Amino acid sequence: MSLFEEVKTQPNDDIPVRRITINVNGEARTSNVEPRLLLADLLRQGLKLTGTHKGCDTTNCGACTVLFDGRPIKSCTMLAVQADGHNVKTVEGLATASELHPIQEGFKEKHGLQCGFCTPGMMMAAAALLEKNLNPTEDEVRWALSGNLCRCTGYQNIVKAVLWAAEKMRAESN
Amino acid sequence: MYPSRFAYESPKSLAEAVALLDAGKGEAKILAGGQSLVPMLKLRFAFPEKLVDINNIPGLNYIRFDADGSLHIGALVRHEDLEFSDEIARRQPTIAAAAPLVADPIVRARGTFVGSVCHADPQGDWAATMIALGGHLVVQGPKGKRTIEMKDFVLGPYATALNYNEIAIEAVIPAPKGKAVGGYLKLERRVGDFATASVAIALDMDGDKVLRAGIALAGVGGKTIDANAEENIAKVAELVAAKAEPRTDHRGSSDYKRQIVRTFVKRILTANSIQKAA
């Protein structure tokens, strides 16, 4: 049996599942889930939002970072049932139909990715930082991203990308 | 990785949560931030029959300094709430020093202070900090509330004085007797790693005088270690006093003079009578 199933009908009482509704990137998504299902797996396999990556699956690497009511969390370390009634923003929620988010642009402009695996988590951690602080120092960027591991870039261009995005977002907000 | 199967409850009140734990007869586990518990479930180091998620219980998310100066931290306060609190930075330097060193920024956004204390990981930052600060926990059980002093709380690795049907609802750090001074240092191989070793020191100072000293260690033993700062100063004073060879004369008995040595060593080591170079 699958651990998740997005459904429109009432769940069967015999199955140990719970009906949950999560606001994902602005859209209410209802699923039946077993309590042991992790949020990362619901997003990827249940809701087919595969932008969220699972790297280590042990709370180390931060590749699965999403925003939970605006705060960054590792979605491999939260149960999907806990997100019932909450807002979740994934990397798919950054861009609009017509344009990239400044953070995404920054990664493009500053070559902030190589293999790209850590990138969604990096972007969401950066989004959480810029939400609080639109004028971060380089140290503050490094500090905010210190829970996200990248094995390719050496981080230099990721930091530049976030600083680039911050500058652009400041310019846009003025 | 999936945890093994468990029932999930998300009570809306403390009474309901305690009743669920009580009915669980030790097989139910509290889920707060989950930043230690969920990895342990996934690795199947833990396999409770039931999880009692306390995140939806109102009234547990507060950082409050009372009029008497004591600090109260509710069970749902996240590490980052302490890290970014101006009042903590101003008034509780030991906590302010430790907060940015807990795990990594993303874990700090979700994990809770009280949960970390109750997890009693020998490498945990907060249990050591609480011991150094001489704090206590307020816990709620089926028969009401009780207080557990931190020095009596951690019994061993991941083992505490909390009963299966009790929830720690608040951590309390008593008002400093003078000015709160302190620090927390941790060596970790990289951000988010467990401590190779860490030391928490909390002092209550009146000018140069140390009114109270607390030292605790994490990562260097089977559980959080209370280094018994005050007791150790007493031990040093004892060793020094034993070196004395006083004779009874018109200025006092030999015992009296030995006691003076003991007292002087204590006073100087606690900076009550320290002389500073200009």
Image: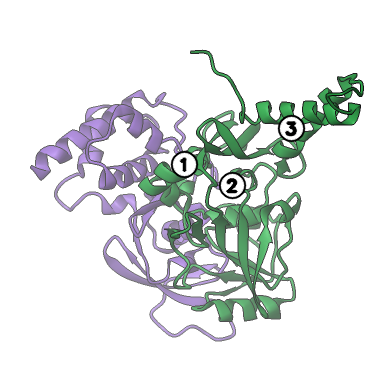
Chain colours: A purple, B green
Asked whether residue B129 is in view, the answer is yes
Residue receiving disc 3? B233
Q: Which mark is residue A151?
A: none
Residue receiving disc 1? B96
Classify A84 as above or below A14. above
The picture quadrant where one finds residue B118 is bottom right
Total label count?
Answer: 3
Frontmost residue, B183 versus B265:
B265
Query: Does label 1 or label 3 sit earlier along the sequence?
Result: 1
The N terminus of chain B lies in quadrant: bottom right
Frontmost residue, B36 versus B261:
B261
Residue receiving disc 2? B126
- Chain hosting mark 3: B
The picture quadrant where one finds residue B40 is bottom right
Query: What's the residue type where badge 1 is placed?
Result: Ala
Asked whether residue B38 is in view, the answer is no
Residue at x 74%, y 71% (from the top left corner)? B26
Residue at x 87%, y 20% (from the top left corner)? B244
